Amino acid sequence: MHKIRLLLVLSTSWLFFVSGRAEQYPKREFRGVWVQTVNQTIYKNMTPAQMRGYFLYMLDCFQRANFNAVIFQIRPQADAFYPSSLEPWSRFLTGTQGKAPDPYWDPLDFLIKECHKRGMEFHTWLNPYRVTVSANEQLASSHIYYTHPEWFVKYDGKIYFDPGIPACRRFICDVVRDIVTRYDVDAIHMDDYFYPYPVAGQSFPDGNSFRTYGARQGFYPNDLGDWRRNNVNVLIREIKETIIDTDKIWVRFGISPFGIYRNKKSTPDGSGSDTGGLQNYDDLYADVLLWSRSGWIDYLMPQIYWEIGYKTADYQTLINWWSRYVQNGQLYIGQDIERSIKAKDLSDSRKNQLTKKMELERNLPNVDGNCFWYGSNIIDNYGGITDSLTNHYHKYPALIPPTSHVNKKKLPDKPQRIGVETTPAGIKLYWESKNKKEYLDNPAYYCIYEFGKKEKVDLNDASKIVIVTCSTGVIFPYDYEKGKRKFVVTSIDRLHNESKKGKSKNIKF
């Protein structure tokens, strides 16, 4: 298999891509990867320079495997991986909560810019309610916990915001507003932690807020579950409204819920899945289908982490269920790498279940991609996962499906004034674009396709994609495969709409 090296203009590292023909690969597919920071200890022992080097290495690994989105946990427990006037620096970044990096720098700004350089989206992953993950943590003196202790409750030895207090929701929305207004993020992302996972023999201590606010809202004293669900519903709706109020209409809001919405036996009409595990609706008070139907979120990413054939929560049963019931917004599937690699294919014990899961995902028309848990498995090539993605399922780059929550009919213009010049590093293909008044009418990045000189141009063929980049030039090294080729460059806007046609240039190597 021949490898082609391309050097992006203004980039400092070599990028590797696979050339050749695809049999059948999607041109549009969300390919995300989660990067967890809670309970991670690697960062606190790094200098800022070492951390930047590690982040670059991490993102290069993801790019080589043709991922197009990174979901990075920047607020693991009411703290921050960025400078914030609302919350202290995270202890998972520097080792001590409230301690700034030394020398001072902004990891969030760095990560966003480096993702965009590589043609990847950056989704900011926030945990809404969690404050501590163990009983013996020391919070920074500047933490909101000390300013408003009445906002918080303790459960299972851990501290949480009380979801029933309106001021807590306003504060969380303030955090979201601060991020979206100050940073060029592509999405706000939350996972499955709303009301905490239930602990046997313990009740969540929100009795005071239920009596105070539940009574005002007509839920007290009989409808505790409905009141809790309403609290989370209001938070989700208000976060969406907060994002809209920033006028950055391209910023999406996505949720990655626990993999079971409701079990069939819990639903009077039998509409739940044929499963028997914990439930979003009943146990975590997360009515995720309501959020999707109401347009409060832009994508759902259920964590279907179980194996095909797992009796309590079968993967195949659940992916079909979610595909049937999510009818508004985009649906991506949360995949557990370790469980997929360790599980045996039910029809061939010599294989793992990754292939079957990818086939199921791609054969369901209502599913638009995957997100893999978690990033270090990709970096470490756990069980050959990165090789499998690079050589098969992600063999060619893919564009993110167009953003569905903004109705924009106008496509971006194709690039202008395409040209070629020689440089010390190789042959440079460059192009220009018109600057338009409306931000969303301008290109956010570009897609470069490669065809034989006399080959018919087919922009639907994913195997012809060479690279996706935000730069306006690519350098082909002098050892590029010899021959005459036609390159076509298209423009793609912030909503992932692609120009109908591209600008072409022939190059002889």
Image: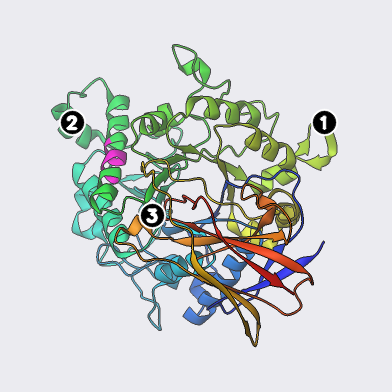
Q: In the rendered structure, does residue 141 fall within the stretch colored magenta?
A: no
Quarter of the figure that contains the C terminus: bottom right
Q: Residue at x 70, y 78 (%)?
A: 477
What predominant SS class does the magenta segment belong to?
helix
Quarter of the figure that contains the N terminus: bottom right
Q: Residue furthest left?
A: 216
| Image disc number at residue 211 | 2
Does residue 359 appear anywhere in the picture? yes
Give the amino acid type for the residue marked by disc 2 in the picture.
Arg
Q: Position of residue 281 (x, y in %)?
A: 41, 28
Which segment is the magenta one? 234-239
Q: Position of residue 119 (x, y in %)?
A: 53, 62
Give left or right: position of 52 versus 420.
left
Number of residues whose C-alpha sits closer than 10 Å to that of mark 1, classed few (under 14), some (14–19) or many (20 or more): few
Q: Earlier in the sequence, mark 2 or mark 1?
A: 2
- Looking at the image, residue 231 lies above or below residue 384: above
Mark 1 sits on what residue? 347
The residues tagged by marks 2 and 1 sit, at their Cα atoms, a distance apart of 55 Å
Q: Residue at x 19, y 59 (%)?
A: 147
Mark 3 sits on what residue? 132
Badge nearest the viewer, 3 or 1: 1
- Looking at the image, residue 389 lies above or below residue 198: below
Location of residue 485 by image quarter:
bottom right
Q: How is the image coloured?
A: rainbow
Give left or right: position of 97 versus 463.
left
The residues tagged by marks 3 and 1 sit, at their Cα atoms, a distance apart of 44 Å
Does residue 78 appear anywhere in the picture? no
Q: Earlier in the sequence, mark 3 or mark 1?
A: 3
Q: Earlier in the sequence, mark 3 or mark 2?
A: 3
Give the amino acid type for the residue marked by disc 1 in the picture.
Ser
The residues tagged by marks 3 and 2 sit, at their Cα atoms, a distance apart of 25 Å
Give whichever of 418, 102 is nearer the camera: 418
